[in-house]
Amino acid sequence: MKKLFVLLALVPALVWASGGGYPLDKAPDLTNDLAALQRGARLFVNYCLNCHSAQSMRYNRLADIGLTDAQIRNNLILTDAKVGDTMNIAMRPEDAKKWFGAAPPDLSVIARSRASGAGAGADYLYTYLRTYYQDPARATGWNNLAFPNAGMPHVLWQLQGVQKAVFAEHEDPHHSGKASTRFVKFETVTPGTLTRAEYDQSIADLTSFLVYMGEPVRADRFRLGVIALIFLGVFTVFAWRLNASYWKDIH
């Protein structure tokens, strides 16, 4: 169990520090879909919040996605925390460092940690959580296309099921006579509790919640931006006409 915890603790930092060159799938933007955010919050507290905190997020902030305090308390708080508390875990950082060598990274802004292009963090998370495959050569039994040799096991395998990756060898066009492997497709070994479409939808929900959690006021910021642009547009018209009126008798 401790080995599982340390793998869960270290993988986010490794994920953002490395990449496998696998093309990222576009993550659906469901940050304006309250039902999707609620489903994503449920996945987050059940599968992520055991080892990773979100200290910049308070439970009562989930009221912004349409939940009441009672719903938050009864469905999303799995400890003795209060609705007004931040999303912390019971494991102390000093203990985690002693046991695992590093404290589990906080996930408050994990979706914003990759700044190379709009939506890159969300696309990476969405792709990463969907491209796990069975690999007996790995100590965990799992590998990942988006992050080859990932240390984190597939904690959502019961939902997705077990799949294996099929690779094919082809000659490297840049090095004559040198072969390399390329990914061809996934094949299902054991089906999960969700269909492929349902699992993709669940990961889209979780990814959107992580995006929302990184900036809960994002929707308000966009709305205020639109209002400001409308104001500037109207003000420009008034200023233009006022200027014309001021200079009309001056030749």
Image: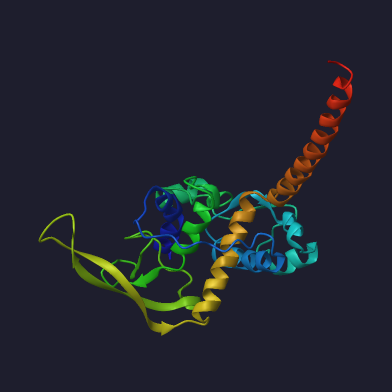
Residue placed farthest to the left in the image?
Answer: 177
Is residue 82 shown to the viewer in this render?
Answer: no
Residue placed farthest to the front in the image?
Answer: 251
Residue lying at 36% horizontally and 64% vertically, measured from the top left: 145
Residue 48 image point, x, y percent? 54, 62
Is residue 193 shown to the viewer in this render?
Answer: yes
Query: Exactly how many numbered labels are in the figure?
Result: 0
Q: In this view, does 41 lie above or below 163?
A: above
Residue 139 horizontal side relative to residue 71, left or right:
left
Nearer to us in this view, 65 or 84 = 65
Residue 235 horizontal side relative to residue 61, left or right:
right
Residue 181 image point, x, y percent? 23, 66
Residue lying at 53% horizontally and 78% vertically, measured from the top left: 197
Q: Is residue 163 above or below residue 215?
A: below
Q: In the rendered image, which quarter is residue 23 located in?
A: bottom left
State the quadrant of the C terminus: top right
Residue 2 horizontal side relative to residue 216, left or right:
left
Q: Is residue 188 above or below residue 6?
A: below
Residue 208 horizontal side relative to residue 145, left or right:
right
Residue 94 image point, x, y percent? 49, 45
Nearer to us in this view, 237 or 158 = 237
Residue 214 image point, x, y percent? 61, 50
Residue placed farthest to the top in the image?
Answer: 251
Q: In this view, does 223 lie above or below 151?
A: above
State the quadrant of the N terminus: bottom left
Residue lying at 66% horizontally and 64% vertically, measured from the top left: 37
Display colour scheme: rainbow
